[in-house]
Amino acid sequence: MNKENQHNCISKDELLFQTKKNIDRYGLHVIMVRGTHYSPSFAYSVGLFETYRQPEIICFGLPEKLGHNIINDVAELIKKGEKLKMYSSYHNIFKDSKAEFLPVDERNIDDYFGAALNYYHKTKFSAVQLIWTDRNDKFPWEENFEEKFLHYQPLLDRNAEFKFREQKDLGIFTTRQWLDLNKPILRVVHDIDGDWQFLTGDQMQEDIRLVSLEEIVKSDKTLNGVFDLDYGFSMERNHVGGEWTKTKLKDEESED
């Protein structure tokens, strides 16, 4: 069907041209986004909302070819007139396991549907997430779901107020200035070993404190803007709500 494209390997104009071409020819275009050391890979459709008045589809954590094929398979069901049902088990998508669709909270769309936002411009569109089960055919919200797979499949019908993939009670490093003096977080560091640092920029070593990730995100929802920061990088801003600037950590900084 339509050709696979890496979301970040061609220019914005080239991607838009290819997207329009495939939508005209096939009714949709499938975007493939490679994972990083921290963030999972994902695939999503562009064009289903325009062509069939059905939501766009996103699926995380599958091998590139499989993710591409699965979205095309679901598109074939839509072309045959099927309306996707939310929170209902499907047995005709994966060969030996169940699948389920969740509605994507509109507050999560900007984080993942870049090419679709570029294509639709000012037109709002809806989206659904295709969820797969683990090797025991359990969904992520079910008891005894394999923990190793939790990070590969963020659930986009929820978590809009807390977008980080770690547990809410994860301990992170911050400063006395934030904790006691209410100073803003201006720099976020995601260490190579996975530790998070939320810094005010005026701290000394003796000022470092340990709090939960949920506590600091609750205090400033704009910190959700760095939820997908890869290992070994930092983000900086001049003020709360300001634009984040991304920087790769130096080797000696990563070791500190």
Image: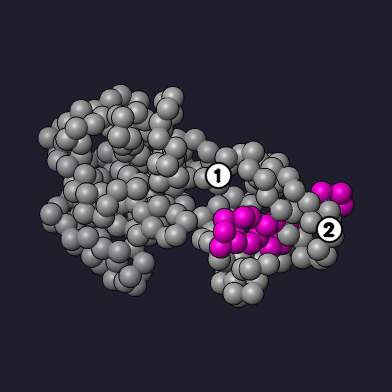
- The quadrant in which the N terminus is found is bottom left
Indicate the position of residue 195 as horizontal and vertical percent values. 62, 55
Residue type, mark 2 in image: Asp
The residue drawn where x is 65% and y is 60% is: 188
Q: Which residue is mark 1?
A: 166
Secondary structure, mark 2, is helix
Q: Is 125 in front, or is 86? A: 86
Left or right of 81? Residue 202 is: right
Using the image as rendered, state which of residue 145 and residue 238 is in the foreground: 145
Which quadrant, please, contains the C terminus? Answer: bottom right
Type of residue at label 1? Answer: Glu
- What's the mark number on residue 28? none
144 relative to 93 in the view: left or right: right
Is residue 98 shown above or below 229? above
Q: Position of residue 36 (x, y in %)?
A: 42, 60
Local crowd at mark 1 within 10 Å, few (<14), some, or many (≥20)? Answer: some
SS at mark 1?
A: loop
Residue 36 in view here: yes
Residue 181 falls inside the magenta stretch: yes
Q: How is the image coloured?
A: one colour
Residue 138 image point, x, y percent:
34, 28
Q: Bounds of the magenta span?
A: 179-198
Residue located 44% across and 60% down the image: 37
Check residue 227 for magenta coloring.
no
Image spot of residue 132 (x, y percent): 31, 36
Q: Is residue 158 left or right of residue 103?
A: right
Q: Earlier in the sequence, mark 2 or mark 1?
A: 1
Would you name the residue on which mark 2 appears? 207
